Amino acid sequence: MSITLLLLILLFSFVVSLSSIIYAFKHLDEQSKSDRKNSSHNKQDIKYESKFLKSVKDLDLNL
């Protein structure tokens, strides 16, 4: 009888840990989707001043 009880506890803990892992991955996926939406939206709203654009125009990026 004690082996049956131990098996039930083990099975219950396995189900709980598996559901926790699935929930965590779903949460991370939703968070990354919202981050991608926000970052693409913010990139389109950036406006630079003409002084900055003139100063960066001749910048050499070859390192």
Image (cartoon, helix red, strand yellow):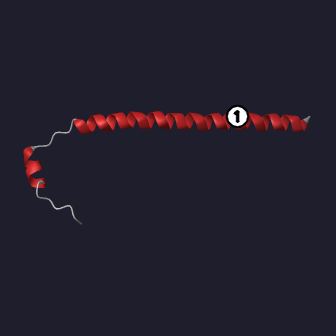
Q: Residue 18: x and y, percent?
A: 65, 37
Q: Residue 15: x and y, percent?
A: 70, 34
Q: Is residue 61 above or below residue 35?
A: below
User: In terms of secondary structure, where does tag 1 sit?
Assistant: helix
Q: Give residue 48's quadrant in the image.
A: top left
Q: Residue 4: x and y, percent?
A: 87, 35
Q: Quadrant of the N terminus?
A: top right
Q: Give residue 38's quadrant in the image.
A: top left
Q: Residue 39: x and y, percent?
A: 32, 38
On screen, residue 40 versus residue 6, left or right, reads: left
Residue lying at the far right of the rendered structure:
1
In the picture of the structure, the residue carrying the numbered disc 1 is 15
Q: Give residue 56's quadrant in the image.
A: bottom left
On screen, residue 34 versus residue 14, left or right, reads: left
Give the amino acid type for the residue marked by disc 1 in the picture: Val
Write the residue at 11% across / 58% down: 58
Write the residue at 66% across / 38% down: 17
Toward the viewer: 60 or 31?
60
On screen, residue 27 versus residue 11, left or right, reads: left
Count every numbered label the image shows and give the total.
1
- Callout 1 environment at 10 Å: few (<14), some (14 to 19), or many (20+)? few
Q: Is residue 13 above or below residue 60?
A: above
Write the residue at 28% across / 34% down: 41
On screen, residue 48 versus residue 31, left or right, reads: left
Write the residue at 59% across / 35% down: 22
Residue lying at the far bottom of the rendered structure:
63
Q: Quadrant of the C terminus?
A: bottom left
